[in-house]
Image: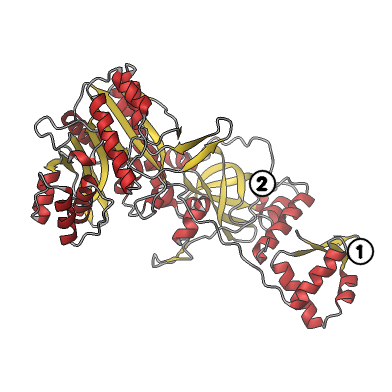
Amino acid sequence: MALSEQEIIRREKLQSLRNLGINPYPANLFPVNHTSKQIKESFEEGKKVIVAGRLMSVRDQGKACFAELQDSEGRIQLYVNRDVLCEGDDKTLYNQVFKKLTDLGDFIGIEGELFTTKVGAQCIRVDGFTFLSKTLRPLPLPKVDEDGKVHDAFNDAELRYRMRYVDLTVNQNVKETFIKRTKLFNAMRGFFNDAGYLEVETPVLQSIPGGAAARPFITHHNSLDIPLYMRIANELYLKRLIVGGFDGVYEFSKNFRNEGMDRTHNPEFTAMEIYVAYKDYNWMMDFTENLLEHCAIGVNGTSEAVFGEHTINFKAPYARVTMTDSIKHFTGFDISGKSEAELFEAARGMGIEVDETMGKGKLIDEIFGAKCEGNYIQPTFITDYPKEMSPLCKQHRDNPDLTERFELMVCGKEVANAYSELNDPIDQRERFEDQMRLAAKGDDEANGTIDEDFLRALEYGMPPTSGLGIGMDRLMMFLTNNASIQEVLFFPQMRPEKKQTIELSDEEKFIVDLLKKSENKMDLTQLKIAANLSGKKWDASMKNLSKHGLTKVAVDGESKVVELVE
């Protein structure tokens, strides 16, 4: 492991702390009784407080320092005076431990009393200092100059997503996004619970991937010797619970789809699905718009949310437009009663990429996605989808070619999908068989397996039911003004880090070989003689090997030993 100069210095400080009898990683509890936020909200001159967090800045004034401590709630100023911290003659705690061996980013515990500085700043006068955790890597610390310009910002997207722990520490706005994410889940959960619906859990590993048109991740169960699929949706299991007698069930589910990644798609994502007995899609539209208004207020304190250049208003009610009318409005083409061949030609005529594997449903979906979807900025329900697009949805009560389905569009993207659920087991079997024919035709998103157990459940009888699914990550994007799904996931999927390859010179390779032949360590003087290099080449080689973390020098009595780091 290659170490930077800073990392080497910090490791030396670590050892120095231990040499002073200080454990840099103590096991005992530190009795924190205040956060920075609590101090600021109820500031009281002279009050004794105990706080802990990271040291984020130090202004050295000789016998005293002003410093900044960051905890989970924000930052608070510290005043560390040598003679207050070290009342006796021994000033080691201040002169050595705090000033020389404590780095920015280290976790420290502070005891002291509150006071107001001459310039009116709230501050803790430190009379107790405890070392809690030594950091071996320096934090990237953005600095703001007098003009408000930020320098050394930690803003490289790949680094931020890969090292979210650093991102959260130095970019406070990021933490706020994830606090709002929890607020969203809490608001939605509260809305459902108040309505009397039950939160449940269903399997992530499934023998048949069902409930959506998507390509699954496949694994293998060794004990049962069967293939299993990571959940693409939890729909079929939740419906089984409705069959079992629950009036309303919901689940926040981790779903997995082995498909492309972009700014709005991650292979692992969170969906919420809810199913309510004795309801239809018209009731669910009213329920959904009231739900989202409630959630927007729960997250941001208002029904309005800014997303890019748009201000979205989640206040109910929302506009309702049929799929047929939408396509007709934006393309002039009426999809009603059209054959697969007619839809294929129409799509090609609109410049949309289509192929022979696509059935009617997929073709209509492609037309809508290319020509209509992006036009809906404010929340809008797109209703009454063609039957071919909705294999789990009930036939429309007024038109047998359509289904009782809606999708909620926000800023040109689908946020929610809902049905009057199909509960006719014979019709459901026929829809599954249609899906199998599409799969055989080459549609890799069509489900090529019939879930016989689910059909059996329907044969035992499912009451009229309406179901709703919401992409939580995408909704979160709109509520927090984040254009990328990676910004609302703590740990988005990333490619593995590329391992850095270290190119060594011939001289460096020779020194490494000498060490390997001597059980990975050798007296410094003997190694220098054995290497037989010029002073310049010796110094350069040893410096490089140390820089790359391949060697280290240890003091053994009066001699120095070079060790090869494995």
Horizontal side, residue 485 vs residue 557: left or right = left
Location of residue 336 by image quarter: top left
The reply, left or right, for residue 434 in relation to residue 52 is left
| Frontmost residue, 310 versus 428 | 428
In x, y percent, where is residue 561? Answer: 86, 64
Rendered view: 20 above or below 383: below
Quadrant of the rendering where the N terminus is positioned: bottom right
Neighbours of disc 1 within 10 Å: few (<14), some (14-19), many (20+) = few
- In the image, 537 versus 178, the foreground residue is 537
Camera-side mark, 2 or 1: 1
Give percent across and percent down for residue 131. 66, 46
State the CA–CA distance, disc 2 to disc 1: 32 Å
The quadrant in which the C terminus is found is: bottom right
Is any part of residue 312 visible from this angle?
A: yes
Dot 2: element: strand
Residue depicted at x 81% and y 69%: 513
Q: Residue at x 73, y 67 (%)?
A: 546
Does residue 405 lie above or below 375 as drawn? Answer: above
Say which quarter of the image contains residue 396.
Answer: top left
Point out residue 355 in the picture as x, y percentages from the top left corner: 26, 56
Q: Amino acid at mark 1?
A: Glu
Q: Find residue 77 and name its label.
A: none
Residues 295 and 415: in front is 415
Q: Which residue is mark 2?
A: 131
As shown in the figure, which amino acid type bears the numbered disc 2?
Phe
Task: Inspect this view and state whether residue 314 appears.
Answer: no
- Residue at 75% of width from left, 77% of height from top? 506
Identify residue for label 1. 558
